[in-house]
Image: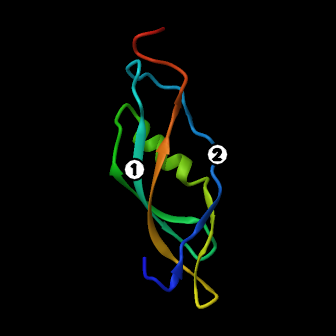
Amino acid sequence: MPKDVTPPELLQHPEPVYTGLVPENYNPAVFLVVFVGTEGQPLSIVIGRGAGYGLDGAAIDEIKKWRWRPAMKNGEPVAVKISTQVKFRLSKSLDKP
């Protein structure tokens, strides 16, 4: 991000819960690249590093709910590309029914 741009500030990010099956002791995190618009909404979302087990799609669905205070340049909101991650709290595992 250029030095004269203030990065966006995350304002709303619901805690994601995943109810699908994953291995026990799995630490799921999906890394994403998000293009945040001038109104603080995600305009595009790309998986940087996925986690599998259906978590990648779930992460995209969660990011669509997130909102940021937009990045600013010279007092005006600007769209920027940022990297972020979604960490899931799991409710089930493959090892425990």
Residue 37 relative to residue 22: left or right: right
In contact (CB < 8 Å): disc 1 and disc 2: no
Residue occupying image coordinates x 63% and y 50%: 13
Q: Mark 2 points at which residue?
A: 14
User: How far across and down, in percent of the image, does residue 84 sit?
Assistant: 46, 55
Residue occupying image coordinates x 37% and y 31%: 53
**Chosen colour scheme:** rainbow
Q: Single out the residue that lies furthest toward the top.
A: 97
SS under mark 1:
strand
At label 2, the amino acid type is: Pro
SS under mark 2:
loop
As drawn, 18 above or below 1: above
Q: Mark 1 points at which residue?
A: 31
Q: Closest to the observer: 6 or 21? A: 6
Tell me the quarter of the picture where residue 83 sits: bottom left
**Disc 1 from disc 2: Cα separation:** 16 Å
At label 1, the amino acid type is: Phe
